[in-house]
Amino acid sequence: MTRTLYRLEGCPYCELVVDELEEMDLDFESVWVEGLHSKRDEVKRVSGQRAVPVLVDDERGITMSESANIVDYLQRSSGEN
């Protein structure tokens, strides 16, 4: 699996990214994070912040946050898959 999405249950911004990934039929792994920001050490380790969503695309060496940025990236890079 080359794409990992760090997400929080019930997060509408995370769901926007999930919807885009599923609509594009892209494989990804979900990592569910803690509700409390102070407990999101794994997200901080990979992205330098504790906010979600965070997408890690190992194949391209990309780590990004902010749902709009992630959706834009997925749309722009879809022709490269």
Image (cartoon, rainbow, N blue to C red):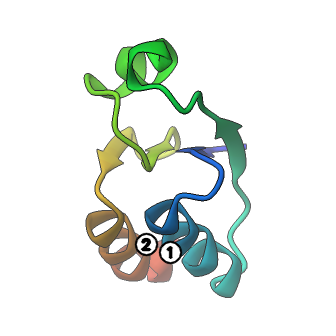
Quadrant into which the C terminus falls? bottom right
Q: Position of residue 38 (x, y in %)?
A: 39, 15
Height in image: 47 above or below 14? above
Residue drawn 61% across the image and 68% down it: 18
Q: Position of residue 72 (x, y in %)?
A: 31, 76
Which secondary structure lies at badge 1?
helix
Quadrant assignment, res 66? bottom left
Q: Is residue 1 left or right of residue 3?
A: right
Q: Nearer the viewer, residue 25 or 61?
A: 25
Count residues near mark 1 (Cα–Cα under 10 Å), then give few for <14, some for 14-19, many for 20+. some
Residue drawn 62% across the image and 78% down it: 19
Q: Position of residue 69 (x, y in %)?
A: 26, 66
Height in image: 67 above or below 76? above
Task: State which mark lies toward you, 2 or 1.
Answer: 1
Of mark 2 and mark 1, the one earlier in the sequence is: 1
Q: Which residue is mark 1?
A: 16
Q: Which residue is mark 2?
A: 74
Quadrant into which the N terminus falls? top right
Residue drawn 47% across the image and 25% down it: 36
Q: Amino acid at mark 2?
A: Leu
Q: Position of residue 39 (x, y in %)?
A: 49, 14
Q: Amino acid at mark 1?
A: Leu
